Amino acid sequence: MQNTDEIWRLVDERKDAFIALSDRVWEMPELAYAEFRSAAEHKAALEAHGFRITEKLAGIPTALMGEAGEEGPVIAILGEYDALPGLSQAAGVAERRPLPGDGAGHGCGHNLLGAGAMLAATAVKDYLEKNGIKGRVRYYGCPAEEGGAAKAFMVREGAFKDVDIAISWHPAPFAAVNEPNSLANTRIDFSFTGRASHAAAAPHLGRSALDAVELMNVGVNYMREHMPSEARIHYAYLDAGGIAPNVVQGSAKVRYLIRASDLPMLTGLVARVRKIADGAALMTETTVSTQVVSAVSNLLGNSPLERAMQNNIERLGPPPFDDADRALAAEFQKTLSDEDIASAFRRMGVPVRKGVPLADEVIPLEAKGVAMVGSTDVGDVSWVVPTVQARGATYAIGTPGHSWQLTAQGQSPLAHKGMVHAAKIMAGVAVDALSDPALIQQARADLKQRTDAVPYVCPLPDDLTPPIKMASV
């Protein structure tokens, strides 16, 4: 579009403030639903740039939205700012060096994600004002992407009901349109209750809840051979029943994360896992109760928006990394295996190249990578609003997601450059949509075609409220 260069200049004019925002959030890593300081930083930035602010979306204390502009189409740009446990790390240091504190760290780059998304939204706000264009841009501050499904709750409560298109991004090793593949998932706690007793003097009187959990895990492991290959099941003990081996454990709790390529497949797998839990309780003469913690849908693509995003990436080219950036990335690559690095190239569907520490190419839209799929609550947004995501090149090729190496690179100049580059991509797509009503119409038609046969059904139980206290579980 002819106005794209102007929007990119507006991004550059604002970038320093949002690089600083990203760095501040990096320094205060907070887990899902506990991002109070990070949300406050985002609110202050929205206020400073003249957005109208709505807080506590869907009843979530750390969810907020800033809006600018009047009438016209509504363009949503989605940001996140939650961190992960156990990934604290000194900035810029290519060896494991956790910082003092609670052990949390931005090992998925959400400090960059939120700040970069708001940078794009602010540039679009400036563009609307300078050109007298009717339209609204919104920045959505979305907490708890890491397992909390906040966007699914926000969708269920209608936070996106009047949005025309949604745009987001995620830190990555390459600049590309995000391939719209993700797994629907649900997290369920299984609580077993038995009968405690003396394990030596009266074992016959006890009924072990821990045995029930272990039998459930064995049953699910046997099920793995007989489920779709793209599905995934993980579990973690929340309560193993205590630390005394001479006590038959009267209670135990395990959390299951069940993933599938779509919601119908997920529903079937969940039913099978529940049957296994019931069987484990029957075998041990215990009882089992369940509590859904969260659930998200799989991502839907949107071809018109993906083509518009690819056009912006191709015009921009790769991020402007310099020799110092490449030298730092090379130091981090030394901490990785050859398989880590090769896997990153294969995931993008491009040939493996040795000696390339940072992205120096634009990934073609038609490139299809090897499926290595996770989950995201952006999936639920994509079922109700035409949605597109970018990958922003912000770390050394091969860096695993959810790793200390990713945390360590989160304040580096190379991460900042990748964040600004991603903001330009998102802002460019927003301007394309505001300048060409046909793009929005085509995006809506694409979504309708994808959902006509299988309409959206929120995967969250109707009575489930956001698990605000999950960070302390």
Image: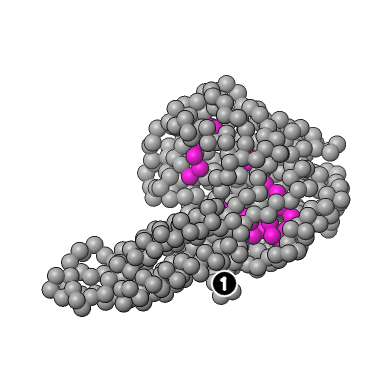
Q: Nearer the viewer, residue 245 or 339?
A: 339
| Side of 377 where 188 appears, left or right | left
Reading the image, the residue beneath label 1 is 461
What residue sits 40% from the left and 32% below the top? 95
Residue 384 colored in magenta in the image: yes
Q: Residue at x 26, y 65 (%)?
A: 242
Residue 409 in sight from this viewpoint: no
Q: Viewed as shown, does residue 330 lie left or right of 194? A: right
- Residue 13, image quadrant: top right
Which amino acid, mark 1?
Pro
User: Where is the N terminus found, in terms of image quarters?
Assistant: top right
How many discs mark residues in the rendered view? 1
Residue 336 inside the magenta-drawn segment: no
Picture quadrant of residue 446: bottom right
Which residues make up the magenta segment? 375-402
- Residue at 33% of width from left, 63% of height from top? 214
Counting other residues with Cα less than 10 Å from the Cα at mark 1, is it few (<14), some (14-19), or many (20 or more)?
Answer: few
351 or 253, which is in the foreground? 351
As displayed, is residue 23 above or below residue 44?
above
Q: Is residue 177 above or below residue 44?
A: above
User: Quick check: 195 above or below 396?
Assistant: below
Across and down, in percent, residue 358 comes to 57, 29
Label 1's element?
Answer: loop
Where is residue 15? Give x, y as percent.
Answer: 66, 37
